[in-house]
């Protein structure tokens, strides 16, 4: 699962990706950038 890291300004694999659900019930994926540790968030379920 890849996401966009704001800090690295590029695509990174989301480390420790977990599926979370937003208030409206839609799935999202949350994790950390493996390079800088910045929290990453992406809409859609983790593979
Ligand atoms: Zn990063």
Image: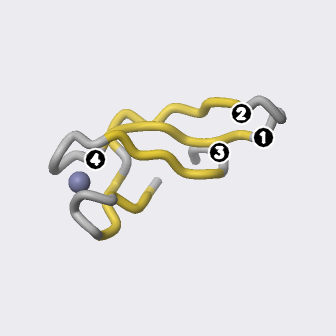
Residue 37 drawn above or below residue 4: above
Q: Which residue is mark 2?
A: 22
| In the depicted structure, whether residue 19 falls above or below residue 35 | above
* Mark 2 neighbour class, 10 Å CA radius: few under 14, some 14 to 19, many 20 or more: few
Figure quadrant, ligand 1: bottom left
Q: Earlier in the sequence, mark 3 or mark 2?
A: 2
Q: Which residue is mark 4?
A: 33
Q: Which residue is mark 1?
A: 26
Query: Callout 4: 10 Å neighbours few (<14), some, many (20+)?
Result: many
**Gap in Å between the C-alphas at discs 1 and 4?**
22 Å
Where is residue 18 shown, x and y percent of the image? 51, 32
* Left or right: where 12 falls relative to 47: left
- Residue picked out by circle 3: 45
Q: Single out the mark in the foreground, 4 or 3.
A: 4
Q: Which residue extends farthest left?
A: 35
SS under mark 3: loop
Labels 1 & 2 near each other (Cβ < 8 A): yes
Marks 1 and 2 sit apart, C-alpha to C-alpha, by: 5 Å
Rate crowding at label 3 as few (under 14), some (14 to 19) or many (20 or more) other CA atoms within 10 Å: some
- State the scheme by which the image is colored: secondary structure
Q: At 40% from the left edge and 45% from the top edge, which residue is drawn?
A: 40
Where residue 33 sits: x, y (%)? 28, 47
């Amino acid at each position: 699962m890849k996401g966009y890291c704001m800090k690295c300004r590029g695509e990174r694999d989301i480390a420790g990706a977990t599926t979370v659900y937003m208030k409206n019930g839609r799935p999202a994926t949350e994790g950390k950038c493996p390079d800088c540790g910045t929290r990453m968030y992406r809409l859609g379920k983790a593979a």
